[in-house]
Image (cartoon, rainbow, N blue to C red):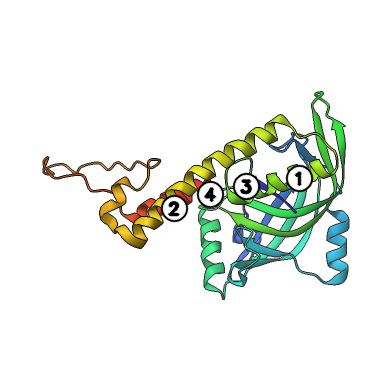
Amino acid sequence: MKIKSLPVKFKTGDDDGLEEGQFLVYPSTFTRTPDSYGDVVAPGAFADDIAKRKESGAVLSGLYGHRMDDPHLNVASAIDEGEDDHGWWVKGEFDLDEPTAAKVYRLVKSGRIRELSFAFDVLDEGQVTLEDGTKANELRKLEAFEFSFVPVGANRDTSIVAVKALADEIVADVKAGRAISAKNETTLREAADKIAAAAVDIKNVLAVIDGEGTEGAGKASGHVTVKTEEPAGAKAEEPERAPSARTRLQIALATAEGATL
């Protein structure tokens, strides 16, 4: 299973002819500009999958952050979907009776969540040369499993979802006898280094929490530095406080997931 993300404009309101809680998005577009994976999506790539769902009455779920394991984060559902010249579109609605879904809806409507991602398998693909001479991998037939609202899209970064997707892609290439691109290998090695460093931070902070108390937090990690501005009129002789163990753990976890605090 692979993941793709796209910054999108969510249509969510009366001005767009939608009812409260409804939205209209394009999880994928047919632009001929390769994405960070070197892929382009061919028109018709979703057609069979959409037809299969409509024929069987299956409903495509809208999740928060690809969390398939938590029913509370299954926050929305597709009420219609299709393809047009621009891409694969989904009209859906949030489960506004559920607090988490209502919260995600407010985040989307206010613009604090601006990206959409979807999980899929590739059923057919092939190499193509685009009009400008660029070579790309064309995705010709896809099976979508869900679409997700995400604060930060899982592209070639160090988020756990992205690293897992990249690792799966490399394993698939090896099994199929395909060459691993230098870019993919470099990205994975850099991600591994950052996650390993963050793991050291997490272990040190947990040691502080488990046995040393917050007094040792200032020396728990050599990777994290926290600076705070002194308010005007503060006593110059007052020693700088070390960040709490909880703060250091939050920073380490954020580093491991490639997030921004």
Residue designated by label 3: 154
- Indicate the amino acid at tag 1: Val
Question: Which of the two discs, 1 and 2, sits closer to the camera?
Answer: 2
Mark nearer the N terminus (3 vs 1): 3
Q: Nearer the viewer, residue 45 or 108?
A: 45
Measure the C-alpha gap from mark 3 to mark 2: 26 Å
Question: Which of the two discs, 3 and 1, sits closer to the camera?
Answer: 1
Q: Nearer the viewer, residue 11 or 259?
A: 259
Residue at left offset 52%, top offset 62%? 106
Question: Which of the two discs, 4 and 3, sits closer to the camera?
Answer: 4
132 sits left or right of 257 in the view: right
220 sits left or right of 48 in the view: left
- Indicate the amino acid at tag 3: Ala
Where does residue 179 sit, x and y in percent of width and height?
80, 34
Q: Provide the secondary structure element on which disc 4 rests.
A: helix
Q: Which mark is residue 137?
A: none
Residue at left offset 63%, top offset 46%? 163
Q: Which mark is residue 203?
A: 2
Q: Residue furthest top?
A: 133
Can you tell which quarter of the image residue 12 is in? bottom right
Residue at left offset 44%, top offset 53%? 203
Mark nearer the N terminus (4 vs 3): 3
Q: Are marks 1 and 2 in contact (CB under 8 Å)?
A: no
Question: Which of the two discs, 3 and 2, sits closer to the camera?
Answer: 2
Residue designated by label 1: 171
Where does residue 142 sit, x and y in percent of width and height?
83, 52
